[in-house]
Image (cartoon, helix red, strand yellow):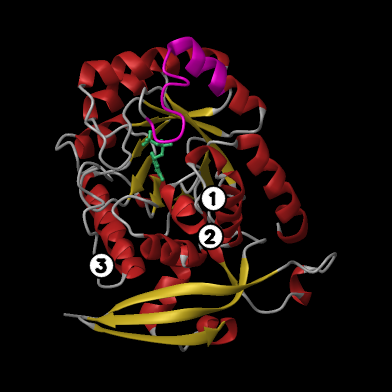
Amino acid sequence: MTASLYIRPVGRIAPPAGAGEREQAPAIAAAGRVDLRFAGAEVIERDGASVRRGFMSAIELLDSSADPHLQALVQRLSQPRVAIAGLALDRPRLMGVINVTPDSFSDGGRYDTTDAAIEHALRLEAEGADILDIGGESTRPGADPVHLEEECRRVLPVIAALAKRSRARLSVDTRKAEVMRRAAGEGAHIINDVSALTHDPRSLSTAAELGLPVILMHALGDPRTMQDKPAYDDVVLDVYDMLEARIEACERAGIARARLVVDPGIGFGKTLAHNLALLGSLSVFHGLGCGVMLGASRKSFIGKLTGAEAGDRLPGSLAAALLGAAQGVQILRVHDVAATRQALAVWEGALG
Ligand code: HH2
């Protein structure tokens, strides 16, 4: 077995005010972004059970005599990302959550009628959401699956109305190929699948045929059982490898890497320690050559750390969103759009 290589950019450098390109310190620019420059990277090599970690400065990483595998990885990490559904990934974008469900973990039953969901979506757009993520099946731990027709009944009228009334990109949060197909027919622009196109055997070919961008999220197992003692050798590297394998499956099915966004799946088959390790290492996922998304809003790891109930987790959610932005995450999936916009405005003012 050949060793696997990972690089995790560290030490973000704020752009010096007014400095020209040539005055800037040597840095690794991630995902083609001029504002996303790192002083170096943790370089990780995994060979079976052995994991070796070292640090390399940007100067060493950019040296043309460096190891060709390393050079290829730096190249993939650095190249600009293609726009997703016409949305440039050159800064953190906000995806507002619209749960048309009776049982979602933080807002179940609040927006489960078509009118309430549409009104909520338009409010989130007015607050600054670039994408509206419409879901009709809760995937919280222990949730029961929802029948196809019921899921369609929940999400399709909302998507159809928003396609006419909203300028935001619309994503459909589903694990079912037929929901993807019908949602695309109503005007959805993006597929968001928490099973990374594994739950439904037809979803890979359907997504390829529809030609829409796809968000591939990592989950360990099914929502009903995923929190039963989740275990990894190394959570960050295992999630990375699984996402890489799903990207390769998509490419074989005819979905180009440029159309994919990856998401480590906070809370999906992960303990508190797993979630925190992923949040601290998000920049490694740029090495997959796709846009990176984070969904940490109101999740239970915040409750486990602080004791806060789902409705009281905004401060923790904002901290997680900024952790993502600092590591170059391009899409932040959040329930509280206005508050996250404000937090990002302050942060971007200094670092963006
Ligand atoms: N989290 C949830 C649902 N969909 N999609 C992606 N890509 N990433 C996530 O982290 C993610 C997701 C769970 O949050 P929510 O929709 O608020 O809850 P529920 O599943 O109970 O409806």
- Quarter of the picture containing the N terminus is bottom left
**Residue 324 visible:** yes
Q: Say if mark 1 contacts mark 3, CB within 8 Å.
A: no
Q: Residue at x 71, y 43 (%)?
A: 342
In three-dimensional space, the C-alpha distance between marks 1 and 3, rounded to whole angstroms, equals 26 Å
Disc 2: which residue: 31
List x then y, in percent, for residue 25.
71, 78
Q: Do the residues bearing badges 2 and 1 touch, measured as CB atoms within 8 Å?
A: yes
Residue 195 position in % (x across, y down): 26, 44
Give the residue type at disc 2: Ala
Span shown in magenta = 104-121
Residue, disc 1: 330
Residue to which mark 3 is pinned: 232
Please tell me whether mark 1 or mark 3 is closer to you in this view. 3
Mark 2 vs 1, N-terminal side: 2
Q: Nearer the viewer, mark 2 or mark 3?
A: 3
Q: Nearer the viewer, residue 110 or 232?
A: 110
Q: Is disc 1 surrounded by few (<14), some (14 to 19) or many (20+) residues within 10 Å?
A: many
Q: Is mark 2 within 8 Å of ligand 1?
A: no
Say what amino acid the circle numbered 3 marks. Tyr
Is 105 part of what is drawn in magenta?
A: yes
Q: In front: mark 2 or mark 1?
A: 1
Residue extending farthest right: 18
> Label 1 amino acid?
Gln
